[in-house]
Amino acid sequence: MAFSPLVDELVESLRCLPGVGQKTAQRMAFHLLERGRGGGERLATALQGAMSGVRRCNSCQNFADTEICNLCADEKRRTGTLCVVESPSDLLAIEQAGYYDGSYFVLMGHLSPIDGIGPQEIGIEQLLKRVRGEGVTELILATNPTVEGEATAHYIADRLEGQNVLITRLAHGIPVGGELGYVDGFTLSHAFRGRKPLAD
């Protein structure tokens, strides 16, 4: 059964969201039209504003509505340490943990030649220029522990070989509170490779 063209367009537009199929899109559309018109109008305004006003920070490539994002503009952040992540959601996870207080660089992806994503597409030249120009002393490669994430980390490390920069990688392994019987082989192998002496 077809609805009006406006309803059909709303349903199809909602399907662009990850994990939203036809039925879920219909439920969302019907909810907005039946009981959430105020919320729908607010959503439309927020979407329009974000789509036209959000850009990439000129320094770290994170989402921002100004040339330099709030994190890069914060003078309280520790200089000399730069953490490289694949996405804004990775940056947010690190920020929410509340431990790291240095600077960031958001790749907005990872190297994937099969998908046509090379160094230019994720801003590696801009990253290298920033490392060399800002006197970065430690570069933390916090890319995801996937094949592509590992390849991206190794590529960046290779490009900085011979520079006076300490290159570190986030530790991977068994989560606190986890049991060995439930940990996958990939995680276990990372944990074994990253083992260190027991602290006194």
Image (spheres, rainbow, N blue to C red):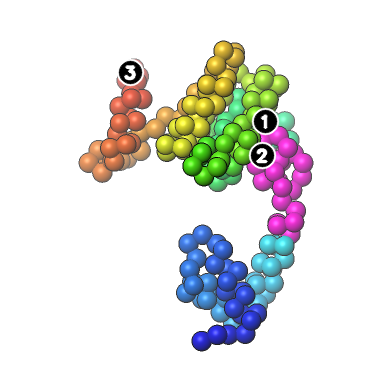
Mark 1 lies on residue: 126
Point out residue 24 in the picture as x, y percentages from the top left corner: 49, 71
> Which residue is at the front of the view, 3 or 29?
3
Distance of mark 1 from mark 2, alpha carbons? 9 Å
Mark 2 lies on residue: 61
Contact, mark 3 vs mark 2 (Cβ under 8 Å): no
Mark 3 lies on residue: 197
Point out residue 34 in the picture as x, y percentages from the top left corner: 59, 82
* Residue 87 lies in quadrant: top right
Q: Nearer the viewer, mark 3 or mark 2?
A: 2
Give yes or no for residue 68 being in the magenta stretch: yes
Would residue 118 appear left or right of 50 to someone viewing this image?
A: left
Would residue 110 appear left or right of 199 to someone viewing this image?
A: right
First in sequence, mark 1 or 2: give its number.
Answer: 2
> Which residue is at the front of the view, 86 or 194?
86
Highlighted range, magenta: 49-71
Give the residue drawn at x 66%, y 67%. 43
Contact, mark 1 vs mark 2 (Cβ under 8 Å): yes
First in sequence, mark 3 or 2: give its number.
Answer: 2
